[in-house]
Image (cartoon, grey):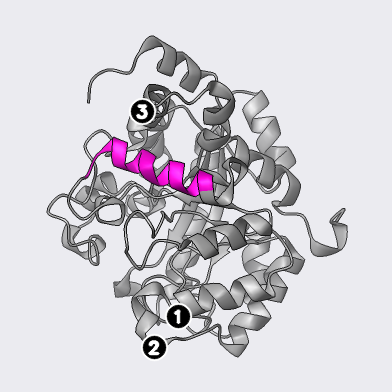
Amino acid sequence: MPETSPVARSLHERSIVVDAHNDLLMTCVRQPVAEQGRYFREHWLPQLHAGGVGVQVLPVFIEAEFRPDGALRQTLRMLEAGWRIAEHCADEVRLCLTGAEIDDAIRLGKTALVLAMEGCAAVGTDVELFGLLHRLGVRIASFTHFGRTMLADGSAEDGAGGRLTASGVEAVAACEQLGIMLDVSHLGAASTDHLLELATRPLIASHSSAYAVRAHHRNLTDERLRAIAALGGVVGINVLANFIDECEHTVSRVADHIEHAAKVAGEDHVGLGPDFIREISDSLSRPGEYEWGLRASRPYIPGLEGPSGLPNITEELVRRGWTAHRIQPVLGLNFHRLFARELGVPGADRAG
């Protein structure tokens, strides 16, 4: 990728950039406990700074080797790693529990970190554990990954047509009451529709792209894009190569997904959820494991291998004639505004 233009670089630098999904905790938790904070400071902070990331959502994804018996222990390890990182790097980051805390972090020039559950393998059918996860700092939750959990079916199970389980229905109400934002990314089609029927609060798709642009089970149809927008939610566009296009793995093609989602859902309901994979995959002991389901010879898009590539999205939108007034909401303002209204706010305390 060529260097970004001065116009795009300046716009990006003065924007609030929200990355709604980066699995970097997977690499941090593999470091010795005493080294996790230093590793994050030396390895990830420079990349987040280079990408201008002001708010970083940190999903807790539990790999197959820990499921099912070790899922709860690994979840606790990863949550503790998130808090340890925040403590070690308190001069640079803040782990935030509310939108107000995010605002404070941004005002102080710090990167706001938000803990999220991806898959909820630790919960099983024990829905009351969401209360504990909330106390430990979790503010976003998706109920499954590619496969089936005791709460819902993932998108790789679409052929089964599974909706939310009884425990999943109970979990929706529990999370909405606690102020844990629900995330439809990775939910199967029927489970997504079921959640959209039940939801009374805005929800998100932290890292999903547009099915009309690339017909992949991980992407959202126009109907689901509209339904998320109707609830006041935001869709974070994923940049994994195979979800973007079967053959054309370019930043331009990512922008096609952004433009389509903006046209269908409205520009106030589109953000970024890149799901950067190269750094994660290269850091795992079994790199191929994390790439399953992608089936791309190169699962990442050149120029979008990691957080430092985010200005390339700004560059492409500028090239297409988007104004700053349109670009900044996509870069982060839409997620930022939603988090300010909803994140960590108990159901009983909501204004409306």
76, above or below 67, in the image: above
Tally of numbered discs = 3
Main SS, magenta region, reads helix
Residue behind mark 1:
153
Q: Is residue 164 left or right of residue 238?
A: right
How many residues crowd mark 1 within 10 Å: few (<14), some (14–19), many (20+)?
many
Pick the residue in front: 70 or 303: 303
Asked whether, in this view, residue 248 is left or right of residue 153, the answer is left
Q: Residue at x 50, y 37 (%)?
A: 88
Q: Is label 3 in a helix, a strand or a loop? A: helix
User: Which residue type carries mark 2?
Assistant: Ala
Disc 2 and disc 3 in contact, CB within 8 angstroms: no
Residue at the extreme top of the image, as rendered: 6
Image quarter of the C terminus: bottom right
Location of mark 3 (residue): 316
Q: Secondary structure at mark 1?
A: loop
Q: Earlier in the sequence, mark 2 or mark 1?
A: 1
Q: Are marks 2 and 1 in contact (CB under 8 Å)?
A: yes
Magenta highlight on residue 256: yes
Q: Quadrant of residue 243?
A: bottom left
Q: In the displayed orientation, state which residue is furthest to the left.
A: 297
For image coordinates 39% across by 50% down, the residue present is 238
Residue 334 position within the rendered picture, expressed as x and y whole percent measured from the top left: 61, 40
> Mark 1: which amino acid?
Asp
- What's drawn in magenta, residue-wise? 249-263
Q: Real-space Cα distance between discs 2 and 3?
A: 39 Å
Q: Which residue is mark 2?
A: 160
Q: Secondary structure at mark 2?
A: helix
Q: Quadrant of the N terminus?
A: top left
- Amino acid on which the number 3 mark rests in the picture: Glu
Q: Residue at point 67% right, 46% down?
A: 339
